[in-house]
Image (tube, rainbow, N blue to C red):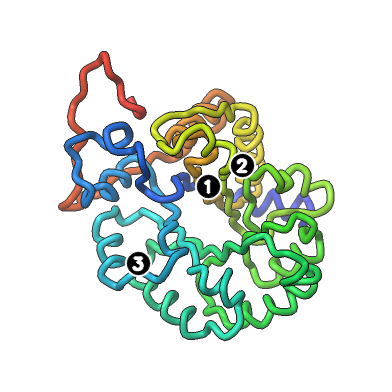
Amino acid sequence: MGDSKSEAKHESKIEARIYLGTSAFTAAGWPGTFYPANVKSKDYLTFYAQKFDSVEVNSTLYGCPTTRTVANWAAKTPDNFIFAIKTPRSITHDKILVDCDAELDEFLGTMEILGPKLGPILFQFPQFSPGVFADRHAFTDRLVPFLNKLPAGRKYAVEIRNPEWLDAEFADLLRQYKIALVLPDLPYMPRPEELALKFDPITADWTYIRWLGDRKGIELQTLTWDKTIVDRTTELRSWVDFCYQIKRRGIMVYGYANNHYAGHGPATIRQFRDLWRQKGFPPLPEPIPSATPALVQEPAKPKTQPSLFD
């Protein structure tokens, strides 16, 4: 971390932005709640982009999409919209960074279709057993050659699910490559304030936050993601404070809420914004839809049935 004078100078020059969205832009329970009943599924992304300025695309974890699909994503969103994209699991889970040049080239080449709308590229690794990697050093021995292959000029983020691997040495490695360490809110992963006792968890001039929650626990209660069923107020207050502090450092934030966090991803982001306002922090930017031809207008609703965003 730099000294206070350099940080103050850095802060004065940069207007750090916070991008907020959800993990995926549709789920069971969203039609008729988040999406008005008269909005067709082909128009979901365009409608979504009226409410959020970014989305984390989850479907790419299961394979590289077609060029036509990606071109449609770009066409259906405003110029200032940002896509965070998960790398296919064939790279991170199956081959685990070995002999996957063809898959990586195809994926990165396809994502370039998004142009300036392409934001963070996420490498989400599973929780590895000792049978796969004896320790974190064995993992980084494989990670470093892979990082050296990544094209410059893009934002890359690494998510680790082995909490014992997170230390200053690993953070410094990511910092060397200007790669963001993902900060997930998971029951078994340390929170940023815990990490900060050992090292600075901010490893680039931006960071990537994932509100994930207890997937197994919440799925015992519901498989329909239409409303909040877990109170995350305390956790979100802490995250609001954290985001405000790193924003003051000039750090850009990308934050995405999964339905498994509280029950309904859009409501989690709405609550984050509400808590931010309650603390009197400077207003967060709201999505400003461009004049996209396919833009969907939200129909008027009776006042007795306010929508999530009224």
**Is residue 245 among the parts visible in the rendering?**
yes
x, y (%) of residue 59? Answer: 41, 60
Residues at marks 3 and 2, CA–CA distance in whole angstroms:
27 Å
Position of residue 141 relative to residue 60, above or below, is below
Name the residue type under label 3: Leu
Q: Nearer the viewer, residue 214 or 220?
A: 220
Which residue reaches farthest right? Answer: 198
Q: Quadrant of the N terminus?
A: bottom right
Residues at marks 1 and 2, CA–CA distance in whole angstroms:
9 Å
| Residue named by callout 3 | 114
Q: Quadrant of the C terminus?
A: top left
Disc 3 residue crowd, few under 14, some 14–19, many 20+, Cα 10 Å: some
Instruction: Evaluate if marks 1 and 2 touch, with contact meaning CB atoms under 8 Å apart.
Output: yes
Q: Nearer the viewer, residue 114 or 261?
A: 261
Name the residue type under label 2: Cys
Q: Residue 10 lies in what quarter of the image?
A: bottom right
x, y (%) of residue 206? Answer: 59, 56
| Residue named by callout 2 | 243
**Is residue 272 among the parts visible in the rendering?**
no
Q: Is residue 95 left or right of residue 102?
A: right
Q: Which is nearer the N-term, disc 1 or disc 3?
A: 3
x, y (%) of residue 20? Answer: 47, 44
Name the residue type under label 1: Gly
Residues at marks 1 and 3, CA–CA distance in whole angstroms:
20 Å
| Residue named by callout 1 | 255
Q: Which is nearer the N-term, disc 3 or disc 2?
A: 3
Residue at 52% across / 39% down in the picture? 219
Q: Is residue 233 left or right of residue 33?
A: right
Residue at 71% across / 44% down in the picture? 191
x, y (%) of residue 31? Answer: 28, 38
Which residue reaches farthest top? Answer: 304
Q: Nearer the viewer, residue 9 or 212?
A: 212
